[in-house]
Image: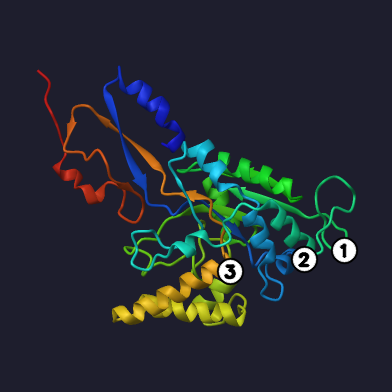
Amino acid sequence: LKTQDIPLLKLGEVKGVNQVHIWRRLHISDVSIQPNYNFDDPKYRELLWGKGERRFIRALSHAIDREQMNEMIYFGRGVPSQVTAHPSSRWYEPRFAEAHARYDPDYSRQLLDELGLEDVDGDGLREYPDGSRLTITFEFLDFETPKSITMELVRDYWREVGIDLRLKSVERRLQAERAQANKMQMTLWHADKVTDILFPLVPDWFYPHRTGWDIAMWNHWARYYQTDGRLGERPPDNVRELQGWGDALRMATTEADRTVAAKALLEAAAENLWTIGTVGQAPHPVVVSKRLRNVTPTGIWGWDNRWTLSYHPATWYFEESD
């Protein structure tokens, strides 16, 4: 069930046998856009990374109207945000969530112009500096959060600044195969694991330490890390430094050391925009039988707290009807 299902579910609540509780998702961003920094196309990799400059990613981020997205998809009840720690975290800072999130298509165009990405043939879409076509194929699994409708908006926003984004929805098995084989030029997943429950243990969004069907930004760098350099590709020095901070966070034995490492990862994410956040912390419908008792009407929903587990389902019970 998704946020946009709430009106229909509430309509059916009046005459139905179920009631609809509105909880809040823990995802800091329901759609976290993942550029593939290790993609096989050298021109694309240079555009994403270059000399460590982040102008292309920042341009894409500034082209997204998150406030409009929030109104259209979430009825204004979500929270626009980049990918960072959850507001409940002791390491959260508003500036991390707001970094490069301002809607400013003119600034986006300026950054793209600086990169030499111009509309050579007059079709409204930009080409690489050598005149070849710049097209981003975006493969994704449409599951759990409103991913398709979000990306349709992103596609339109990016087209307004001259970026040709081609969306391709795939099923789970293909997502897993292509993500881990480093075949995806750009993809997405929802940014969970950002509360103090899981962020210190699996900070997946903040440095390359594992490969998976849900994390496909930096497979070669992660494999290098996992195998001590036997496989994959040595990452740039600043990413190697991130891997050190990630290890420090996961192995810290004092709160002071843990805080230093966490802040270093969050600062780097805000500066570099490893991923592009959209809108998160959205309302989530939880449909419950009207006979089921002890279910909290308000709660939080996400992988971090294992959805309903923290609300003790063993204490729920059905009230017998007469």
Element type at mark 2: helix
Query: Which residue is the site of mark 3?
Result: 272
Q: Residues within 10 Å of mark 1 (few under 14, many from 20)?
A: few
Please report whichever mark, 1 or 3, sits nearer to the chain's N-terminal start.
Answer: 1
Marks 2 and 3 sit apart, C-alpha to C-alpha, by 19 Å
Q: Nearer the viewer, residue 285 or 189?
A: 285
* Front residue (pair 92, 254): 92
Q: Which residue is mark 1?
A: 130
* Residue depicted at x 36% and y 70%: 200
Q: Is 174 displayed left or right of 288 in the figure?
A: right
Q: What residue lies at 74% left-to-right and 51% top-to-bottom?
A: 163
Question: Going 29% across and 81% down the picture, which residue do you hit?
Answer: 253
Give the crowd class for mark 3: few <14, some 14-19, many >=20 residues within 10 Å.
some
First reached walking from the N terminus: tag 2 or tag 1: 2
* Mark pair 2, 1: CA separation: 10 Å
- Give the image location of residue 81, x and y in percent: 49, 55
Residue that carries the numbered disc 2 in the rendered image = 43
Describe the element under mark 1 as helix, strand or loop. Answer: loop
Q: Name which residue type carries label 2.
A: Lys
Q: Is residue 109 visible?
A: yes
